[in-house]
Structure formats: structure tokens, C-alpha cells
Image (cartoon, coloured by chain):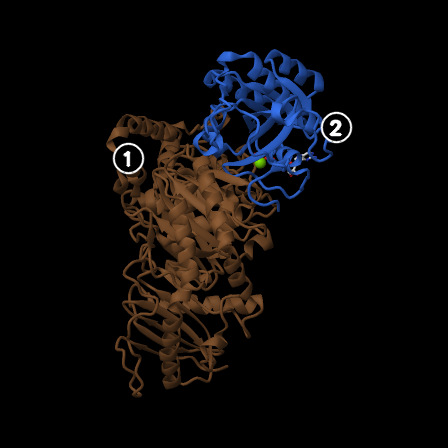
């Protein structure tokens, strides 16, 4: 087996004379529609910090509703009332009194464990399997995820039936509260091959158990996403309210049907580098075509209270038009993409659904008009508003946008781009370069070529993803962040480079030399620069 | 078409479909609107909107159907749809008594919150599952009478009863329009062109004849995959 060598640098020049030239970052834009984000920026390292809701007193949704002009003040007042009442509308339902007895007292672990012998009669989980802690299949899963309330009540388990895992939930809750009692917070446990990572939020505790390639921070990031997915379904306001009323509430009742969004989010995070990078991928399109699409939206969806309008095709962003004052966070965009990917029902008809974007405003719902614009259900249009009564207005907008896109071949261009695949690494004409991820920081967008040999099989793709996780984790190491990492592994050579403007992770064949690699990277940056108008959305369109 | 074009009036009515998770609301609507059944139909998120056009008596009836989600977390959205509805289809699954009890909750909620006249139609779906029947026909029928609702047993799978249920609802809507002046129904003067986009309102609309007539019998917005 080949040896592993590496070089770390905080200087940009290479001792061998070759130089990485820090030029303007390709895909850079001062006018981004997404909130620029650093990897890991989203993770609050201090998990027990005051709950996020405090930052959002009143919330953005409230703000937008209030902005409405003065003549409409009366109406606004009413609207606000509606909003408020909408929030308090959430029915917790009269739960049968049976499970009132099963309060897990934090101090009384023995009692909690006792409980485990009589699993509660909560709603049946959608992923019932006979797997429990003793089944070999369950034990061999690479990543487990558990979510439970701070009273120890199971909320979600990625594998197996929560009710059968009650003991385990009890133990995890006991661990968390035991350490909390001593005024400390549990963050992670490393046990042999396994890494246990804890994310503690008000009312909810999330635990990830991994024996894969992800680092503690990366698992923490995944847990943060899952927590946001829960908020996206319920809002922080109703989560607070539910647990205030009944500390022992079985949240699965409210999440029933939403487990599949948690499942699909987890699967997506294991294959899609966008989560790792905190960036989204755009559908490659000629900038004139993309402008035409954005203009169709601006012209035909100029509707009061419409906050964001976006178009998504095959998990890639086609365009985004936003209200002038507001930006979309890539994390929220990932939540939207996950919703579109996981919910088949949008393909049957125009839909109207509440969705909370936790980074935008975790305290309330936006209302989403969701529809596909083409027969094959490839191009999805999402209109996000604060006006719960505007379905028919938005439906009209959708029709007009659709008409225009048909007339000017916009849908055709999208479907051509989807069919053609993105681009081949061959197009970059750089020998020895096998694959790369390039993130433009200012726009929170990334690009990467198609997966080609040798990364065609699933195990190979997983291995490649693991290499990126490794490279990413080393570069963003909390204790020792790096600017450049050159790593020679047994099967490939890796180069990671982070500047103010971009993050680049490149994978070479094993025989590449350092000067060659550096030369290749400079060529690659030039290539991306040439293609930047097609690969990135560089201007930000507003209503 | 036996009626003379010129005498046709257009009636637009909102129909809301309510009922527990998984009773087959979407399947029933898709069977009616799209004429098919798919085993792979997935749970509704929020609500889906369908339209269906039919000619009945001397009316061109356009039904705007809101197919709501039965999942608990969407329960609080329901008022948004039923508040403006002219008819409500209350769907349960004949093989689940719980789903039948849920109907009673829906009915009392409607009674509390809706003050305009509304056509109620009780729908016992999955009647192909005779072996697993938990709700008897007569119990359901008696209940329907007690709340003054229409009643049908249907199967989206076998295509029984669905066409009829919607047809009778449409008839009752016409009757409601013709007989009830205070029903909150709108009559649009024939001399004013009716602009749909300006009237996404709650009521049944009647528009004069001679308007653009669509040949398409039904359309579900979006695509049919
Ligand atoms: N045997 C039988 N199965 C049916 C019938 N109608 C629907 N189903 C099945 O019941 C399940 C649920 O159907 P849906 O139409 O999604 O139910 P829904 O009421 O719309 O569910 P939500 O959208 O979650 O509220 C699906 O598996 C359907 O195939 C029927 O008439 N007979
Ligand atoms: Mg449905």
C-alpha cells in the first residue's frame, strides 16, 4: 500500500517554486441572492446557548406583514391577528390521558428505564421494522440518528421502531441530563469506531452515531439540519407551545408523515456535497436564458407579500427572485429542495402548503405555492408568500410565467441542460485531475463536474465523498484550520485550498506531483472563470 | 349537448375534501378528475387544487376542488379551505372506525365555524374492502341523515360511486343556488365580462353564457404523472 504523505501550508507559495495564484475568485459576486456562508458557520458550538427564537422577536414574517402601506393599516391589523391566531391555531389535540402517567422524570433514571418495558401507545411509526438494538442489521448501520424530547420521549430514529428503542432513548437522555446536572454539556463520545455526537436544543435532543468518515463537526452539522427540518414542519413557536403545555407530549403525532423528510434529508446529506459546503448547485444555463427566466418572474409575479420565487430542476437552482430586503440562506434552500424531492404529491396538482424556513424566520410559516411547469415534472416553481389567502393570485402568476417560458423556449433550455448533464472533467482539459468541488463563497454556490471513472460505482462514489469529508474536515479543523492541504493517499492525491473568495477541493490521480497539481489548479481556476456565467448565478434579481 | 349554448349559465363552486390521513381523499379526487387510480399515490402535503368542469341541467359547472392533507400537522390549516367552501366531501374509510369517528369531529367543527350554507356529502371510501368492513352501511346512512348530508359508499380502486357522488353534489349546489337567496352566492350580470383573476372569492359564481368555453372537460393543474 502506498504511503500517505501530506503537506500543510498557511503560505501560498510552494517551496518548489510553483505558485498558487490567488486571483479573483471565479463565480464571485458582490450581488448575491443567497446569504454567503462559511462551512460550519451554522453550527452553534455552544449548544445550550439561549434558544434562537430570542433573536427573532417579532420575526421577519411579522415585519413583512407590517410593511404593508398605511391605508391598509386596518387590514394589516387584522392580518396580524390572523397570523397570530394562525400560530396559536395549532391543535395539540386532546391526547388520551393514558400516557399522562409516563412522565420521564429527569432525575429518576431507574423509573425511566423501567418504562421501557411498557412501550407507550403512541402513533405507529411509519418505518416499522422488527429491528431493535439486538438485531445485527440494526447494529451494522453506518449512521444512526436519534431525536428525543428532553423528557426522554422518542421522536425519531433513523432505523428501527422508536418504541422498541425506548431503553436506548432513556439511556441517552440520562447521559445528557446527568452531565447537565453538573453544569456541563455533553458534546461527543468516542467509543472505538463509533462517534456519538449530541446536539442539545430547547426541548429536543439530537444524537448522531457514526462509524463512517464524518467528523464530529460534520455530524453536528447534519444534526443541525435535522433540527431545522423539524422546525420547518412545526415552527419553533409551536414546538415551544406544545412542550409548554405538555412536557411529555409525543411529538410523533405532529411529525406523523414528516419522518420521510428527515429520512430523505439524511440520504441527501450522504451524497450531496452542497450540505458539506453550505452551498447550492445551479443548473448550468446560458446567462441570457437565465435572465429571461428571471425577468418572466419579475414581470408576472409582482405580487404584494411575495417574498421569494424560485425555480428548481433536479435539485439544482435555476433562478431565484427575492423581495429587495430579504435574502435566502443556503440552509433554507436545502430544506426547500428536500421538500420538493421527497414529496411526490406536488406532481399531481398545484399545491398550497405552509413551510417554515428556520434561518429566515423560525417562528412562523411562509405559505408556498408549488407546481411543476412541464409534463415530465422536472421544473418546479415555488412561490413563497406571507399572505395565506393568495393562492389564486399566485396560480395566475404561475400560468403567466409558464406561458412565457414556453413561448421563449425557457423550459426547453432547462430540459436540454438537464439532459446534457453538467460537464465532464474532460472539458477542463487538465490531465490527472479526476474530480473537484469549487465553492464561490460570496454567492454560496458551488460547481463540480459529473462523476466519471473511477467513481462510477456506488462504493467508489461513497469513498470519494469520504475523501471530500476528510479534506474538508482537515481544512476547517477547529483547533488547527489550514489554508492549503496537499495529501497523498493510497489511491489518489488530494488538494484543498481555501481563500477569502473560494474553497476548492480537488482529487488527482496518485502519481501527480505537487508542481503539476498546483499548475492544474491554476488552470482549473481559469476554466471556472471562463465558464462562470453559465455555472453560477452572479446577479441577484429582486421584485 | 342538448341545451342551447346561449341558455347555459356558468356556475363556479368550491368543494373541500376532508377526512383522516390515508382514507383515500386524493385517490377519490384523482379518480374523478383524472379517471385513474394509482396504488403509488403519496400523502398530500398541505392541500392540492384540482378543477373539474361538467355540464348539468342548463349550467356549466366548474368545481374547484381542494384536496386537503389528513396528516395531523395540517389540521390547523383546514379552516382556510372550508370557510369558503360551498360543499364539503367528508371521506372516511369503511374499514376503519376511527376514520368514521373523525368525521363527527369534522362535522361539529364545520357547524361551529361555517355560517354560509354548505352542501355536505358523507363518503365511505374503500368499499371494495368488504371483508375488513368496520363501519356498517346503515350506521353511516343514519348518521348522514342526522346531519342532513348526502351519503355514498365509493371505491377509488374499483371506480364505484365516485362519479355519482360528485354529480349529486353538483346538482345540490345548483339547487342551493336557485333556491337560496341569502346563500352568499354571487350572480354576475351578463353585461359585465367576468374576470376570474379578480374574483378568487368564496362564493359560487354564476357567469353569463357566451363566455369563452373550454372544451376540456377536466383539468388538473400541473401534470398527470
Ligand atoms: N382498497 C382501496 N384502497 C384505496 C382506495 N382509495 C385509496 N386507497 C389506498 O389508500 C391509500 C391512501 O390513499 P390516499 O388517496 O393517499 O389517501 P388520502 O386520504 O389522500 O391521504 P392523505 O393525503 O395523507 O390525507 C393508498 O395506498 C391508496 O392506494 C380504495 O378505494 N380501495
Ligand atoms: Mg391525499
- Residue at the extreme right of the image, as rendered: B131
Cα gap from disc 1 to disc 2, whole angstroms: 56 Å
Given residues B56 and A465, the one toward you in this image is: B56
Q: Residue at x 72, y 33 (%)?
A: B159
Name above or below for residue A24 compared with residue B48.
Answer: below
Under circle 2, the secondary element is helix
Residue A44 % position (x, y):
31, 52
Colour applied to chain A: brown
**Total of numbered circles in the picture?**
2
Which residue in the structure is indicated by mark 2? B130
Question: Residue B31 is drawn in which quadrant?
Answer: top right
Q: Which chain is blue?
A: B
Depth check: B187 or A498 in front?
Answer: B187
Q: Quadrant of residue A364?
A: top left
Please provide percent x and percent y for residue B151.
Answer: 66, 19
Q: Is residue B205 visible?
A: yes
Amino acid at each position: 500500500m502506498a504511503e500517505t504523505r501530506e503537506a500543510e501550508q498557511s503560505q501560498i507559495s510552494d517551496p518548489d517554486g510553483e505558485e498558487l495564484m490567488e486571483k479573483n475568485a471565479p463565480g464571485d459576486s458582490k450581488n448575491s441572492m443567497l446569504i454567503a456562508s462559511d462551512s460550519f458557520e451554522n453550527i452553534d458550538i455552544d449548544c445550550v446557548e439561549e434558544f434562537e427564537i430570542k433573536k427573532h422577536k417579532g420575526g421577519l414574517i411579522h415585519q413583512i406583514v407590517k410593511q404593508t402601506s398605511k391605508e391598509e393599516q386596518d387590514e394589516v391589523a387584522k392580518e396580524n391577528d390572523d397570523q397570530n391566531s394562525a400560530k396559536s391555531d395549532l391543535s395539540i389535540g386532546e391526547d388520551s390521558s393514558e400516557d399522562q402517567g409516563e412522565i420521564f422524570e429527569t432525575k429518576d433514571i431507574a423509573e425511566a428505564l423501567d418504562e421501557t418495558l411498557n412501550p407507550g401507545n403512541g402513533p405507529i411509526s411509519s418505518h416499522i421494522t422488527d429491528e431493535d438494538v439486538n438485531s445485527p442489521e440494526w447494529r451494522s448501520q453506518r449512521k444512526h440518528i436519534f431525536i428525543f424530547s428532553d423528557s426522554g420521549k422518542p421522536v425519531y430514529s433513523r432505523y428501527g421502531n422508536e418504541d422498541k428503542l425506548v431503553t436506548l432513548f432513556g439511556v441517552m437522555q440520562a447521559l445528557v441530563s446527568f452531565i447537565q446536572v453538573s453544569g456541563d454539556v455533553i458534546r461527543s463520545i468516542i467509543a472505538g469506531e463509533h462517534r456519538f455526537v449530541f446536539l442539545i436544543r430547547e426541548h429536543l435532543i439530537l444524537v448522531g452515531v457514526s462509524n463512517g468518515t464524518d467528523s464530529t463537526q460534520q455530524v453536528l452539522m447534519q444534526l443541525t439540519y435535522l433540527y431545522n427540518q423539524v422546525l420547518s414542519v412545526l415552527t419553533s413557536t409551536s414546538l415551544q407551545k406544545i412542550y409548554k403545555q405538555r412536557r411529555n407530549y409525543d411529538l410523533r403525532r405532529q411529525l406523523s408523515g414528516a419522518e420521510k423528510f428527515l429520512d430523505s434529508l439524511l440520504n441527501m446529506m450522504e451524497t450531496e456535497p452542497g450540505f458539506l459546503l453550505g452551498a447550492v448547485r445551479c443548473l448550468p444555463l446560458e446567462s441570457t436564458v437565465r435572465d429571461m427566466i428571471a425577468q418572466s418572474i419579475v414581470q408576472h409575479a409582482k405580487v404584494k407579500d411575495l417574498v421569494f420565487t424560485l425555480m428548481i430542476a433536479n435539485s439544482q437552482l435555476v433562478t431565484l427572485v427575492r423581495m429587495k430586503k430579504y435574502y435566502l440562506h443556503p440552509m433554507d434552500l436545502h430544506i426547500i429542495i428536500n421538500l420538493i424531492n421527497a414529496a411526490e404529491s406536488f406532481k399531481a396538482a398545484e399545491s398550497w402548503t405552509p413551510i417554515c424556513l428556520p434561518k429566515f424566520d423560525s417562528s412562523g410559516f411562509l405559505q408556498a405555492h408549488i407546481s411543476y411547469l412541464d409534463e415530465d415534472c422536472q421544473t418546479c416553481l415555488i412561490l413563497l408568500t406571507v399572505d395565506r389567502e393568495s393562492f389564486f393570485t399566485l396560480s395566475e402568476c404561475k400560468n403567466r410565467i409558464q406561458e412565457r417560458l414556453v413561448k421563449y423556449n425557457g423550459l426547453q433550455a432547462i430540459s436540454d441542460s438537464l439532459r446534457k448533464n453538467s460537464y465532464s472533467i474532460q472539458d477542463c482539459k487538465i490531465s490527472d485531475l479526476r474530480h473537484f468541488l469549487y465553492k464561490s463563497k460570496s454567492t454560496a454556490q458551488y460547481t463540480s463536474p459529473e462523476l466519471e471513472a473511477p467513481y462510477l460505482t456506488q462504493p467508489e462514489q461513497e469513498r470519494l465523498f469520504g475523501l471530500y469529508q476528510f479534506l474538508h474536515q482537515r481544512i476547517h479543523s477547529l483547533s488547527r484550520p489550514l489554508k492549503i492541504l496537499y495529501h497523498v493517499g493510497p489511491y489518489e492525491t488530494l488538494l484543498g485550498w481555501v481563500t477569502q473568495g473560494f474553497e476548492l477541493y480537488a482529487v488527482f490521480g496518485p502519481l501527480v506531483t505537487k508542481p503539476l497539481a498546483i499548475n492544474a489548479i491554476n488552470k482549473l481556476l481559469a476554466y471556472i472563470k471562463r465558464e462562470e456565467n453559465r455555472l453560477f448565478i452572479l446577479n441577484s434579481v429582486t421584485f | 349537448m342538448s341545451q342551447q349554448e346561449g341558455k347555459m349559465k356558468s356556475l363556479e363552486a368550491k368543494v373541500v375534501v376532508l377526512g383522516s390521513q390515508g382514507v383515500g381523499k386524493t385517490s377519490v379526487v384523482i379518480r374523478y378528475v383524472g379517471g385513474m387510480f394509482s396504488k403509488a399515490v403519496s400523502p398530500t402535503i398541505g392541500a392540492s387544487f384540482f378543477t373539474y368542469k361538467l355540464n348539468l341541467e342548463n349550467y356549466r359547472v366548474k368545481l374547484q376542488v381542494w384536496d386537503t392533507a389528513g396528516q395531523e400537522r395540517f389540521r390547523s390549516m383546514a379552516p382556510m379551505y372550508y370557510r369558503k367552501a360551498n360543499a364539503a366531501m367528508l371521506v372516511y374509510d369503511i374499514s376503519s372506525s376511527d376514520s368514521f369517528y373523525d368525521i363527527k369531529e369534522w362535522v361539529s367543527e364545520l357547524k361551529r365555524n361555517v355560517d354560509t350554507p354548505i352542501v355536505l356529502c358523507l363518503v365511505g371510501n374503500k368499499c371494495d374492502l368488504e371483508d375488513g368492513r368496520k363501519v356498517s352501511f346503515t350506521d353511516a346512512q343514519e348518521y348522514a341523515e342526522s346531519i342532513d348530508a348526502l351519503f355514498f359508499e365509493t371505491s377509488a380502486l374499483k371506480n364505484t360511486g365516485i362519479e355519482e357522488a360528485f354529480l349529486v353534489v353538483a346538482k345540490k349546489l345548483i339547487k342551493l343556488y336557485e333556491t337560496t337567496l341569502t346563500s352568499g352566492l354571487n350572480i354576475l350580470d351578463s353585461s359585465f365580462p367576468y374576470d376570474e383573476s379578480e374574483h378568487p372569492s368564496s362564493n359560487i359564481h354564476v357567469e353569463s353564457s357566451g363566455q369563452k368555453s373550454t372544451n376540456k372537460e377536466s383539468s388538473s393543474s400541473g401534470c398527470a404523472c
